[in-house]
Image (cartoon, helix red, strand yellow):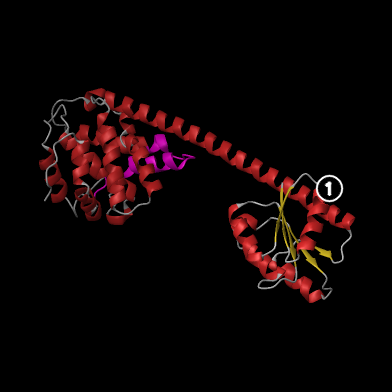
Amino acid sequence: MRVLIVDDSRSSLAMISTIIKASTTADVEAVLHPREALDLCDQTQFDLVLVDHIMPDMDGVQFTSALRHHADYRSVPIIMVTSDVDPHTRIDAIQAGATDFVNKPFDPTELQARVANLLALRSAQVELANRASWLHQEVERATTHLLEREEEIIWRLARAIEYRDGDTGEHVSRVARIAQLVAAGVGLDPQRCRMIYLAAPLHDIGKIGIADAILGKPGKLTPEEFSVMRQHVTIGARILENGSSELIRTAELIAQSHHERWDGTGYPDRLSGTDIPIEARIVAIADVFDALCSERPYKPAWPIEKAASEIRACSGSHFDPDCVAAFMASWPEIEKIMGQPSLAAD
């Protein structure tokens, strides 16, 4: 423990230092000038401060008030040493942040007792703070571990769904990365962008409930088959409903609404405009773009420039115009994701 004594009298400094050193193992620092003491507190953490009341340039009340403005000294005990018995002086000192008082002339035994009590209090305070910090770190470590496990499960499940749909799983990875770029482009905070990135891979989880004959059909679906295929959004939302984590709740919104259209002609609920969750509006662009660029049993892959032109053409009808603008603003990064040489986007 470290003790700081501030007094403009050399004899008082020597006496107080001797008394404290005789009864504790604390390191004692004695300073004549209060401003010098404040500078020292900027560099050193003391556990107890004793300050004289009457000093030139800055009195004990002013010193205490200034010291309490230091973040590291808001809870450090401060003893005011004073010969002034005026109650107003004590009130001023308490309001400034003084913890205790010692009257001049002081009794050495009383001073030792007060110092010992406040050092014991400070020691318990530091121990509790250290314990709280350790517990906080442990909680953060455990939370991080749980999140990592949750993320791993989501990615593995998403890849399994893609394999069943005839893809290697790269589609969900690209959709997630593009969606994160668009989310940042429309001004969502980093945590929400990250959440969309992690939830996007589950956008087609409902395809688990669709027959293989429809999923893998090489030609165009009949109206009846397309009606069945549309059910994957409802199935996906049911799989994810009532989630206890923000990640699963975000994934539910995306699964339910990523086939809605800005003009209200989408499915399953024919939502329009901002009634469609922003998460779903963002993933809709990433999903359609990558699907256009990917080979499917019923179509060849489009060049990315042609797919980007289609996204622009559907701004205000299929897609949220703000999301389209964010998509195009991120075009250089999207080209890298798609593994193509960088080309200027119009």
- Dot 1, how many residues are within 10 Å of its Cα: few (below 14), some (14-19), or many (20+)? few
Quadrant of the rendered image containing residue 138: top right
Residue 216, how many percent across, how many down? 21, 24
Quadrant of the rendered image containing residue 169: top left
Residue under label 1: 23
Residue 202, how many percent across, how many down? 34, 35
Examine the structure image and report whether residue 14 is included in the region drawn in magenta: no
Residue 65, how many percent across, how many down? 66, 67
> Which contiguous range is marked in magenta?
237-261
Where 165 sits versus 231, above or below?
above
Residue 248, how many percent across, how many down? 42, 39
Quadrant of the rendered image containing residue 339: top left
Residue at image coords 18%, 52%: 315
Residue at image coords 76%, 50%: 119
Furthest-front residue in view? 10
Magenta stretch: helix, strand or loop mostly: helix
Residue at image coords 81%, 53%: 18
Residue at image coords 11%, 42%: 305
Q: Nearer the viewer, residue 323 or 108?
A: 108
Q: Nearer the viewer, residue 258 or 90?
A: 90
